[in-house]
Amino acid sequence: MTGTVRVRFFARYAELVGRTESDLALALPATVGDVVRAVRTTVPGGGEIPERPLAAVNLRHARFDAPVRAGDEVALLPPVAGG
Amino acid sequence: MTGTVRVRFFARYAELVGRTESDLALALPATVGDVVRAVRTTVPGGGEIPERPLAAVNLRHARFDAPVRAGDEVALLPPVAGG
Amino acid sequence: MSYLTKDPILVGPLLAAVSAPERGGTALFLGSVRSGAGEDVTGIEYSGYEDMVEAEFGRIVAEAGERWRGARVEVRHRLGLVPVGEASIAVAAAAPHRAAAFDACRYVIEEVKKRLPIWKKEFHADGTTVWVDPSGKPQAAPR
Amino acid sequence: MSYLTKDPILVGPLLAAVSAPERGGTALFLGSVRSGAGEDVTGIEYSGYEDMVEAEFGRIVAEAGERWRGARVEVRHRLGLVPVGEASIAVAAAAPHRAAAFDACRYVIEEVKKRLPIWKKEFHADGTTVWVDPSGKPQAAPR
């Protein structure tokens, strides 16, 4: 089964891929790691994003092995620098 | 030899002795403890001040055995409650 | 109500929002754009994953309220270009006594540094910009 | 310049006094007159050994400046009758980084509580007054 997730890019990562979001189709069930691998291989410039970036699923920090479902919003986050 | 020190009273202690200051003659050399004893025995109401109150000499906190010289300002301080 | 603002952060309303007769201690932290001796930073542009920032701020504030019962916390983060000397973040925490006010305020700013999805682009006097990587690797931003 | 004031303490000028481009972190503490649930305190009258307060504040601020190099501290204490909810003391500390700002601010308020010759007379709704003894023995004030 295949599903679509919305991937969002921020700050330097957005500059690397030249966009702020991308809808990505991938085989389900999937993890954050699967999304990152898909981004790195299919999105132009995505190979410059680290292999294990910080990530969030549906507005929450998520580990590399966290599950991703169809319709989820997955964000790849450069090292945070708030405050 | 005898000298005079200026004793100052604050807050509840000032209310106990009904005054804010008193010039006290006492035998020198003397200590803060000597001043407190003189206050407790010679100043009306002074006996209600504790035997070992907080004290300051010339605007600095001073221990009970700190020396007191002629012309010094000795203050008897109720428990402090600043802030 | 939003935890984010594009305008200068006003301290007065933030302090007023946490104050109450039963809360005798209030701690405030302001983080400002810094330019040390020999540096030529003129400002920092803050950008964020705004929906997640709001959610994460809500979680951090709720955690502080559970950990320090009786404490009330408010926080604002500024986005956009912030000139040197102006605050990018303000955290206000009030509690019945001072220890809880200090500790809750400190908790919020430490969690913000670890968790809040906000990024900084430093602007330098020579016109260059650099993404700030808190892990210690500044990287020139493509213009 | 005096560390004491009979007027409400203004936070803005205090923050401005410690701020500088090289000091990116600022911590502020406000101690306010408190009235908890079931209490009937309407205000507190603060009195002090004013000459010594000025001297002791000077020493405390200098100690903080020596211990946290690069930190700048300002402090104000209000005297006279302060109504519930208003600040009796404000401590502002700015430093290059936040840990020193928090620590210097905390140091000053802790030392103030231990060393500053200031006394509080609580005013109650029924018209009675009580000297506050921080050692825990409230004593009715003769009127």
Image (cartoon, coloured by chain):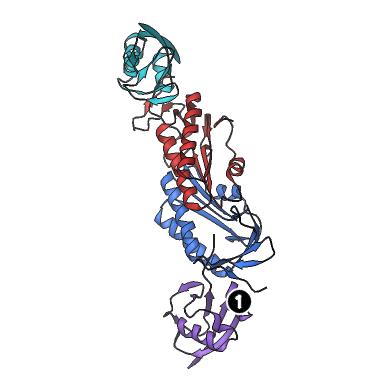
Chain colours: A cyan, B purple, C red, D blue
User: Horizontal and vertical percent for residue C131?
Assistant: 41, 27
Q: Is residue D77 above or below residue B51?
A: above
Subunit of label 1: B
Disc 1 packing (10 Å; few <14; some 14–19; many ≥20):
some
Query: Furthest residue to the top?
Result: A1
User: Horizontal and vertical percent for residue D60?
Assistant: 47, 61
Foreground residue, C11 or A69?
A69
User: Horizontal and vertical percent for residue C16?
Assistant: 61, 44
Foreground residue, A17 or C66?
C66
Quadrant where the N terminus of chain A lies?
A: top left
User: Horizontal and vertical percent for residue A40?
Assistant: 33, 13
Query: Furthest residue to the left?
Result: A51
Residue C23 in view: yes
Where residue B5 sits, quadrant-wise, is bottom right
Residue D1 in view: no
Q: Under tag 1, what secondary structure? A: helix
Task: Name the residue at 40% across, 26% down.
Answer: A61
Q: Is residue C8 above or below residue A63?
A: below
Q: Is residue D59 above or below residue C28?
A: below
- Tag count: 1
Mark 1 lies on residue: B14
Foreground residue, D40 or B17?
D40
Q: Is residue C79 above or below residue A69?
A: below
